[in-house]
Image (cartoon, helix red, strand yellow):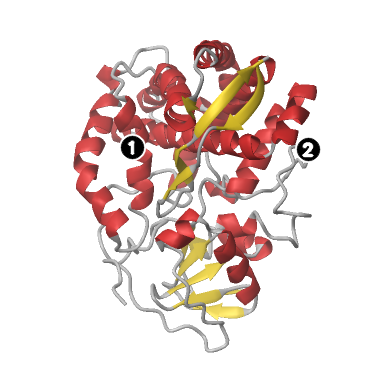
Amino acid sequence: MRLIEGHRPLTPDSAIPVFDVDPYSEETLLDPGPFYTALREAGPVVFIPRYSVLAVGRYEETRKTFSDHENFVSSRGIGMDDFKLEKPWRPPSIILEVDPPDHTKTRKVMSKALSPKVVRTLMDDFTAAAEAIVDRLLQQSEIEGVVDLAEAFPTTVFPKAVGMKDVNTRHLVDYGAIVFNAVGPDNARRRAAMQRAPEVGGWITAACARDRLTEDGLGAMVYAAADAGEITSEEAGMLVRSFLSAGVDTTVTGIGNALWCFSQNPSQWDALLEDPKLARPAFEEVLRYTSPVHTFARTANLDTEIADYPVPEGAKVLCVLGAANMDPDKWGDPEVFRIDRRPVGHMAFGAGIHGCVGQNIARGELEALLSVMARKVARIEPAGEAVWRPNNAIRALDRLPLKLIAK
């Protein structure tokens, strides 16, 4: 066993089931379904010896652990390393990796900038961009769904919404993949991410500086909060960088997964065409069914328990959101993709005070795109094999050959 820096070995209670399966193997990351099932069946909480961590995958235990910010904190890192034991390789996220009262301050600023009211003011731009992209793609006999649509749409609309003057599509897309790979164990994916982090992270930091933003975007709203004394200027820059994971990476993954779901389930695309108002519920079902973020960690900040099993202070707990979203005790026929399900309470955006702060804008982008496609696209057909991209924390497609058939 080779533990990541800043992670100490755990001696679990003898009653906790041992689950010697690698959640970060390429086999698991490319096809996580069997892992999710085995994890839930093994028990409400298990011990994974190769990484010396606990893991939860049943819905109730996952939601409770993820949401309990007093016993299971984010401020010690959402990955395998414990920030209390070793300085992290990057500044901790001041949204995902802080706890109250600091979290309350920064989340208030982000929630205001990404409120439903603000997102509504962006919907016309989102819709216009979606129409232009979809119209262009309908002229092609075949498209590459990830690059041509899943990446193209968010990287067109979101930098403008933030007010970014500098746009590097590849860096915008790769930034999230690097950050999420870095929360994994000491494997090849994490090491590759650490090598690329200085280049891509440096560009992101520069592009989010105040002098590289317009005065009428979401970024300006965050810096205005610094002017008002709600946060510091340094915190403002960090929050603007946080936008990129919320508004780009989450949305790129969600769009790609939505296209895959509908290409594999044509009857559900027909259902959306019959009732375009299902665009929002359809996206929620895509999130439940594919779980773009499949694993985040929490750290026990004191001696506590999960499902009556003792958990010592310092224990890392993997919250396997993808397994919770497929728990048959929560969802009827979870293996079935059904856009009229309305899966209230799914864990794709997390839960509690650390739920994804950018979910409003991600939902707005996806709703705009699906609504436009429902007006213009009769069928979404596979044009080759979908290829998934293994990542330590997110489940995203690498390639998705498609045919879009116009109405």
Q: Residue at x 25, y 38 (%)?
A: 201
Look at the numbered disc 2 and give the secondary structure of its residue.
loop
Give coordinates of residue 215: x percent, y percent: 37, 12
**Which of 109 and 254 lies nearest the eye of the viewer?**
254
Q: Which residue is mark 2?
A: 340
Q: Residue at x 40, y 51 (%)?
A: 391
Marks 1 and 2, the one that precedes in the sequence = 1
Residue 115 seen from this side? no
**Which of 194 and 311 lies nearest the eye of the viewer?**
194
Q: Is residue 298 left or right of residue 188?
A: right
Q: Which residue is mark 1?
A: 174
Q: CA distance from mark 1 to mark 2?
A: 33 Å
Asked where in the image residue 58 lies, by quadrant, the reply is bottom right
Q: Is residue 313 left or right of residue 325?
A: left
Q: Residue at x 52, y 86 (%)?
A: 13
Asked where in the image residue 198 lies, by quadrant, the reply is top left
Give coordinates of residue 302: x percent, y percent: 48, 72
